[in-house]
Structure formats: C-alpha cells, structure tokens
Image (cartoon, rainbow, N blue to C red):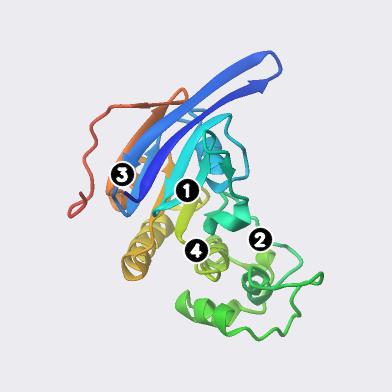
Amino acid sequence: MIWDIALHKQLRHDHARFALDVCFASDAQRVVLHGPSGAGKTQTLRMIAGFTRADAGRAVVAGRVLCDSEARIALSPQQRRLAYVFQDYALFPHLTVRQNIAFATHQGWFNPGRHVEDPRAERWIEAFHLQPVAGHYPHQLSGGQRQRTALARALVTEPTALLLDEPFAALDKGLRERLRAELRGLLAELRLPMLLITHDDDDVRALAEHVVHLEAGRVVERPFELAEGAD
C-alpha cells in the first residue's frame, strides 16, 4: 500500500471549530485529493508532510510510518523525506533559480553562492529546461518557470513522494494543460508517488489514478470519470 492515511484534528479559528477526519488507503501512484475550498485539503497535506501535527491517527507513505499516535511516532518534516510544492511555490526572492534549487541540498549557515556548482541541481535545471534562466531571480520568471523551479527544488533531494498544493491554480489554461502533461510524464519516468490537492476537475481528469473527495473535513464517496488509461 502506497498511501495509508487516517488523520484527525480539531481546528479552531476565533469561536468556530472544524473537525478534520481524513481516512483513505490507495496503492495508486497518483492520488488526487479533490474538493471545494475550505474542505480541509491543505491541512491534510500539511499533516502528512509534518508541518502540522495531527491530534490522533496514522500516516504511512510508500511503506514508511511517518506518524502514529498510538505508537508515539512523529517524524520531523525532514525525516519524512517528502517533497512539498506550495501553491505560491515559496521561492526565495533573493536567490537565483540555480541557488533556489541548490538550497535544498546545501548545508551550513549561508545560502549557496550565486555561482554554485552542484551536479544534483544541474541535473534538474537541465531536466526542466531552466538553463536559460538559471541565473534569474523569481520575479524575472514566468509562471511556468517558477513552477518548474519549485518542482526542481523539491525533487533534488530524491524524496520518497511528492506533495502538491494546487500547483496549477495561478497559471493560464494553455500553460496548465502543458504542465499537467509534463508532470504526468515526469512521474511516470521517476515512478514517484504523488498526492495532489485541487478543486479543479481538469486536474483530476489529467492526473488522477485514484480520487479522494473531501467535503467539510471528511472523505465522501462520489463517482468521477478519470483520464483514459487511469485506474
């Protein structure tokens, strides 16, 4: 089983409470967590990544127990070895494309130098065709280039799975279609498990092998026509 998730958390905002109770299991490489805004998708992804701690439950990804409240296991985000791509990409504005990608492998107190040479970073710069903009800063990049940079930074550490938070939301329709196809091809090549969250039906049709529908913090049954060739 690639994904075995059963996580529970009570969220509070002012005087309002929201119960998140997400349970699903899947052996699919590409799982899409689908639902409207406010359904709890991002909080679920953050609990799996370890950025937010669940009140109770268990998360197992690719055979590794990431957290288990009964067994008192709670790996740190670094120990979980999951690549997380944020909706806004979270690139460092003062670092170039090459520095942003190399940052994930860099050790020490200082940022990697502007002319850093790291074979791991160069591999992904080439893979995502970022050579012409490798010395550019995030504000100089197009939306697609920023997304490719964020993906390269996530993948350079050789993670065990990829977590994506609404990765196409800020892109125009034509670019979304092209990048979905690129992402699907990349995942097939790497055989890397992916969990993507979205409220866009087109993302689901293009990328999902298994769809988990989330509404008001809970998984619900709902049929969905997947892309041709998906499970």
Where 51 falls versus 43 (above or below)?
below
Question: Badge 4 is on which residue?
Answer: 159
The amino acid type, in three-letter code, at marker 3 is: Ser
Instruction: Name the amino acid type tagged 1.
Output: Val
Q: In this view, does 213 lie above or below 163?
A: above
Q: Position of residue 80 (x, y in %)?
A: 55, 54
Asked if residue 167 can be seen in this view, the reply is no
Circles 4 and 3 in contact, beta carbons < 8 Å: no
Report the side of 226 relative to 42 (left or right): left
Q: Which residue is drawn at 61% across and 37% down?
A: 53
**Quarter location, residue 110:** bottom right
2 or 4: tag closer to the N-terminus: 2
The residue to which callout 1 is attached is: 65
Which residue in the structure is indicated by mark 2?
91
What secondary structure is marked by label 3? strand
Q: In the figure, residue 10 lies in which quadrant?
A: top right
Q: Which of 6 and 97 is in front in this view?
A: 6
Q: Identify the amino acid type marked 4.
A: Pro
Sequence-first tag of 1 and 3:
3
Is tag 4's residue or tag 3's residue first in the polypeptide sequence? 3
Question: Residue under circle 3?
Answer: 26
Tell me, yes or no, whether the two marked residues, 3 and 2, touch with CB atoms within 8 Å: no
- Of callouts 3 and 2, which one flags the residue occurring earlier in the amino acid sequence? 3
